[in-house]
Image: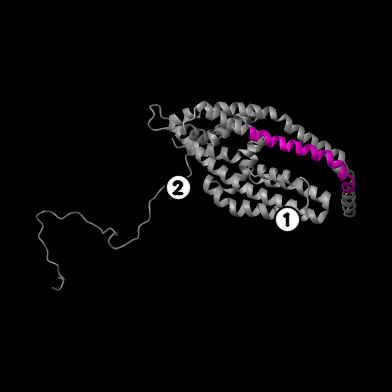
Amino acid sequence: MNLAKRGPLPWLLGGACVVIVVAGLRAASGILNPMLMAGFLALLFQPLTRRLRGWGMAGGLAVALVVLAVVLSGLLLVAFVGVSLRQLALQIPQYGERLGGLVAQVSARLAEEGIDAGAYLEGALRGPELGRFVLNASGAIASGLSNLALTFFIFAFMLGGMWELERRASTHSRDHSPLAARFLGFSETIRGYMGVRAVLGLIAAVLDYVLLEAMGVDYALLWGVLSFVLSFVPNIGFTLSLVPPTLLALVEKGWPAALVVLIGYQVINNVIDNVIGPRFVGREMKISALLSFLSVIFWAWVLGATGAILAVPLTVLIRDLAFGSADPPDMGTPQPVTPSTVPMPQGPPPPHDAPIVDDPHPAPA
């Protein structure tokens, strides 16, 4: 029976199943986040271990070297961001006088417009409250080290088991798995996407760092590093990386410097994300900008920060596993239409005993 003739019941059941699955994912995000991030890292670094094994290195040693390099890089990044935020929190009281002046100016301006927001601004932008907020942020980063350790532990085991996935993906294997082959094909797409995002994010981060150094904004290297890390979060990451240096420029240098930082960030990141990026990201992932933005909102709501980082890969993985690859069918190279290639209408073949009729218009000799 046609599905359209069954009424809305199948659609309602399907929607209910989706709601249950999403609710389960959100409830289990605490354990899913380390597993998803570990699997993502294993897919990224699987070619490196395969190359090390190809050079004659033992499989266990290759996995250990790759895991050690990734762990050290992650720890250095987290330590740098945490220490920098601690130093920034300790220096916030030095900006108290200028911050109070800015609050007074904004409160007076809002009072002229009939908006009484002075008490709220003084409570939200007072130096001790900002310092406490930054200290809490750095403390959250430090507490996240436990999840990071669990992620790296799972990553080591997943990376060590990737050879089994490679073996089953091979068509020469007796227990060949088409799903494993499709999953490895998806990993190639993910590596291409992450490579493009890394290059574009690095270019934007370097330009942002040069802009902040030229404007004399403190902790320019920290904001450049955060700009690079947040570049892996489509659409939303740029806004998150823009706010801190703009506020710091406002407190240190005043409104003109903050305006220059704001406009400079907008020009640099919009050109890279909206002019250069879609040509490469869309080619690698075959996903529209609207779907990318909606996927970030959805997965960030379901899984938190990990979902925001893995939003596009998760969306493309579900799409490819459920509906197949988005590659268009190969129709071959189009051939020019010539008289010799135009098919002529053919009727039924004449009977064997049919008389031969001479051409009424014979060609001249």
Viewer-nearest residue: 124 or 99? 99
Sequence-wise first label, 2 or 1: 1
Quadrant of the frame with the C terminus: bottom left
User: Which of the 4 image quadrants contains residue 88?
Assistant: top right
The image position of residue 138, as x and y in percent, is: 76, 35
The image position of residue 49, as x and y in percent, is: 51, 33
Q: Evaluate if marks 2 and 1 touch, with contact meaning CB atoms under 8 Å apart.
A: no
Question: Per the image, is 95 magenta?
Answer: yes
Q: Residue at x 52, y 46 (%)?
A: 284
Viewer-nearest residue: 34 or 324? 34
Q: How far apart are marks 2 and 1 (CA)?
A: 40 Å
Q: Which residue is drawn at 67% across and 43% down?
A: 230
Q: Which mark is residue 328?
A: 2
Quadrant of the frame with the N terminus: top left
The image position of residue 342, as x and y in percent, is: 29, 60
Q: Which residue position holds label 1?
A: 263
Is residue 83 in sight in this rendering? yes
Question: Per the image, is 167 magenta?
Answer: no
**Is 236 placed above or below 175 here?**
below
Magenta residues (range): 72-100
> Looking at the picture, which amino acid does disc 2 mark?
Pro
Structural crowding at the residue carrying mark 1, measured as other residues with C-alpha within 10 Å and reported as few (<14), some (14–19) or many (≥20): few
